[in-house]
Image (spheres, rainbow, N blue to C red):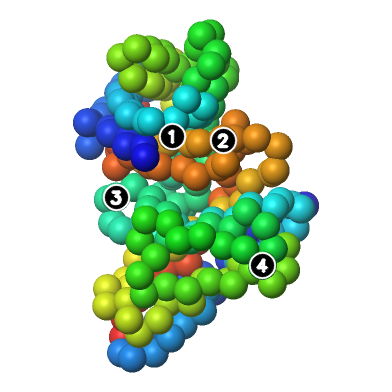
Amino acid sequence: AQTVTQSQPEMSVQEAETVTLSCTYDTSESDYYLFWYKQPPSRQMILVIRQEAYKQQNATENRFSVNFQKAAKSFSLKISDSQLGDAAMYFCAGGTSYGKLTFGQGTILTVHP
Amino acid sequence: DGGITQSPKYLFRKEGQNVTLSCEQNLNHDAMYWYRQDPGQGLRLIYYSQIVNDFQKGDIAEGYSVSREKKESFPLTVTSAQKNPTAFYLCASRPPSGGNQPQHFGDGTRLSIL
């Protein structure tokens, strides 16, 4: 079984600044994967970044990067040079090798101009 | 363009009525999933299917049913046994090649009680 916890219901950031969203997880699986999804007001779910648990190197996608601390079971998302279009609900999710995803409760990110 | 199509976008259910939400994908994905999202909450798994003619219950399957007769289609029926069906429903699919492949999502169906 997996649990995913996002302890920050809301976060805010000034445009062009950096913000970090927190996520912790717990799993009994040895083979698992971690994802961050973005849900803008349109309600569409958009993949932001993914991390394979067996990889030690933190994943990076342009302005988005993760800090994956396997021993601490932590998977935070850092957004650099924040833009107005980054405003959305962000979900952390854990997945198994057969594809089931468990989602956290989400963090609403507000970007101030 | 390949993608996942959910219909209708909005659906209203009367008391005691069953309603069916459609999910069609042309991505040639084997696995398909149904999630429920309540306001301000994360997604919870209702049912999933790894292959045609096979499906498994997720975390909140009570009051729902599914079928998987074709690879492209995974309809969800919200039965009258589901006493609190008002929510946003998302369908997803995933390529077969490993757990690191992300799920692709449709645009969702919002279901409300009349």
Q: Dot 1: what SS?
A: strand
Residues packed near mark 3 inside 10 Å, few (<14), some (14 to 19) or many (20 plus) = some
Q: Is residue A91 above or below residue B111?
A: above
Asked where in the image residue A11 lies, by quadrant, the reply is: top left
Callout 3: chain: B
Distance in Å between CA atoms under marks 2 and 3: 25 Å
Callout 4: chain: B
* Most foreground residue, B112 or A29: A29
- Residue type beneath disc 3: Gln
Say whether mark 4 and mark 3 are on the same chain: yes
For marks 3 and 4, the one nearer the N-term is: 3
Q: Residue A97 carries which label?
A: 2
Residue B107, can we see it?
Answer: no
Say whether mark 3 and mark 2 are on the same chain: no
Q: Residue B41 carries which label?
A: 3
- Residue type beneath disc 2: Ser
Distance in Å between CA atoms under marks 1 and 3: 16 Å
- Return the residue at label 4: B53
Q: Do the residues labelled 1 and 3 touch (CB within 8 Å)?
A: no
Q: Nearer the viewer, mark 3 or mark 4?
A: 4
Find residue B26 and report its horizontal and vertical position in percent.
75, 58
- Return the residue at label 1: A94
Q: How many labels does the image show?
A: 4
